[in-house]
Image (spheres, rainbow, N blue to C red):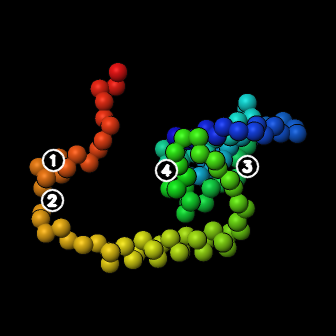
Amino acid sequence: MGVRLDGRLITPEQEFNIVSDGIAKGAIQSLGDATLTVFTGDRQTTGGYRKIAKIILTDLDRFAQMPLASTLRFLIVSRKEAVAAAYARWRWLESMPSFLVPTGSSLSTELLLGLSLIDGVTAGN
């Protein structure tokens, strides 16, 4: 659902009584105990805590891939800058097919299972 951030707590100057409202992907919410949580793709649909910021969608994938205990810094961007970043990312993604090289073999279930594409799977104990 989200990633809880570890660091300096943000304590509000006054209490807020907020009615539950929608939570956008990337929203940063200040919970009741003053901790911060970044909500990702599997977030709940509504919440009643203060939303103090949002990670722009262009950066959310990189945020989700950060190793544990990484240092995270935020930069304030305007709506115009966020939209420009989204278009730049879209253009980059659109160019990806030109970098793809055919493998020369068909991708069968047997081939994919034999490649061990997932590593580190355990029995859970």
Q: Give the amino acid type for the residue marked by disc 2 in the picture.
A: Leu
For disc 3, the marked residue is 52
For disc 4, the marked residue is 65
Pointer 2 or 1: first along the chain: 2
Residue 107's mark?
A: 2
Pointer 4 or 2: first along the chain: 4
Q: Name the spot of residue 17 as percent of width and height, x first.
A: 79, 37
Q: Give the amino acid type for the residue marked by disc 1 in the picture.
A: Gly
At 58% from the left edge and 71% from the top edge, which residue is drawn? 85
The label nearer to you, 2 versus 1, is 1
Q: Name the spot of residue 3 as percent of width and height, x first.
A: 57, 41
Disc 3 versus disc 4: distance between alpha carbons?
22 Å
Residue 114's mark?
A: 1
The secondary structure type at the circle numbered 4 is: loop
Among the 4 quarters of the image, the one containing residue 58: bottom right
Mark 4 residue crowding within 10 angstroms, few (<14) / some (14–19) / many (20+): few
Residue 54's mark?
A: none
At 13% from the left edge and 69% from the top edge, which residue is drawn? 104
